[in-house]
Image (cartoon, grey):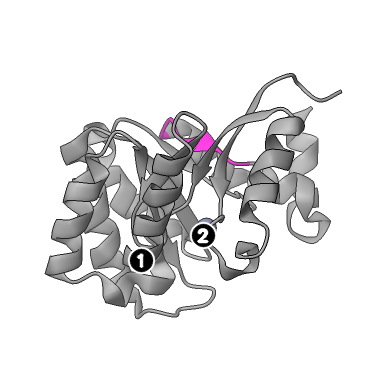
């Protein structure tokens, strides 16, 4: 049975693939009981677009402000200063998505780590939680996050598909766990389903 009201905390609604039917998608979500959605910002431009969407659907859509590890090389001092302003807007409910992705390595790992530090500092500064991305980078991810955890309002490890041990490490850090990967992709999440019982 579907609950009467759901909040989807990670929708990539700024993606080009929604250019032709974005409003229809938002309407269908409402009909299905998804009362609020948080549009993921993953770069400077997509953060601005996410905020515009949130502002034009006030109270229904919200946004995150941040730079995905794939785009970590783009996080200049100027963009960081922009994100600081954007992250303070009332429509922005979290900083991210940010983190580490050693599976694709689209930005160099040292650059990803620096961008992750800067965004965790930003989240602490604005007092908002972090929307976290991690793939094949568990040890470095936990090490960096541990340094900042006390200063953070909270965080969610979105689309978690790691091991039982990684799950326990995140829960010990008092992170929320996104289970979309478990329930939508049996190749990546089936090993975790027994843990839900
Ligand atoms: Zn992600």
Residue sitting farthest toward the top: 4
Q: Which mark is residue 14?
A: 2
Question: Does 40 appear above or below 75?
Answer: above
Q: Residue at x 59, y 41 (%)?
A: 178
- Side of 17 relative to 182 (left or right): left
Q: Considering the numbered disc 1 on the image, is that residue within a helix, a strand or a loop?
A: helix
Q: Which of the pair 55/94 is nearer the observer?
A: 55
Rendered location of residue 77, percent (x, y): 12, 67
Q: What residue sits right under mark 1 in the picture?
A: 45
Callout 2: SS: loop
Assign the C terminus to one quadrant of the image: top right
- Cβ(mark 2) to ligand 1 < 8 Å? no
Asked if residue 77 lies left or right of residue 1, the reply is: left
- Bounds of the magenta segment: 173-178
Instruction: Name the spot of residue 119 as percent of width and height, x first.
Output: 26, 53
* Residue furthest right in the image: 1
- Considering only order in the chain, which callout, 2 or 1, is on the residue closer to the N terminus? 2
Query: How many numbered discs sit on the rendered protein?
Result: 2
User: Image point 80% across, 61% down: which residue?
Assistant: 187
Instruction: Name the image quarter holding the N terminus.
Output: top right
Marks 1 and 2, how far apart in space? Answer: 9 Å
Tell me if residue 187 comes above or below residue 171 in the rendering: below
Question: What kind of secondary structure does the magenta stretch mostly adopt?
Answer: loop
């Amino acid at each position: 049975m579907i609950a009467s009201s759901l909040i989807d905390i990670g929708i990539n609604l700024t993606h080009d693939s929604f250019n032709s039917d974005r409003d229809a998608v938002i309407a269908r979500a409402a009909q299905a009981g998804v009362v609020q959605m948080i549009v993921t910002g993953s770069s400077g431009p997509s953060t601005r677009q996410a905020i515009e969407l949130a502002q034009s659907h006030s109270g229904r859509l919200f946004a995150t402000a941040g730079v995905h590890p794939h785009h970590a090389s783009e996080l200049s001092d100027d963009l960081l200063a922009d994100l600081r302003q954007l992250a303070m807007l009332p429509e922005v409910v979290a900083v991210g998505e940010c983190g580490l992705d050693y599976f694709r390595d689209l930005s160099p790992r040292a650059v990803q780590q620096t961008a992750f530090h800067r965004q965790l500092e930003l989240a602490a500064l604005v007092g908002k939680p972090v929307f976290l991305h991690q793939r094949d980078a568990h040890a470095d991810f936990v090490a960096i996050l541990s340094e900042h955890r006390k200063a953070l309002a909270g965080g969610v490890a979105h689309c978690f598909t790691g091991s039982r041990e990684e799950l326990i490490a995140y829960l010990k850090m008092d992170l929320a766990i996104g289970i979309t990967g478990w329930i939508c992709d049996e190749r990546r999440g089936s090993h975790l389903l027994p843990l839900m019982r």
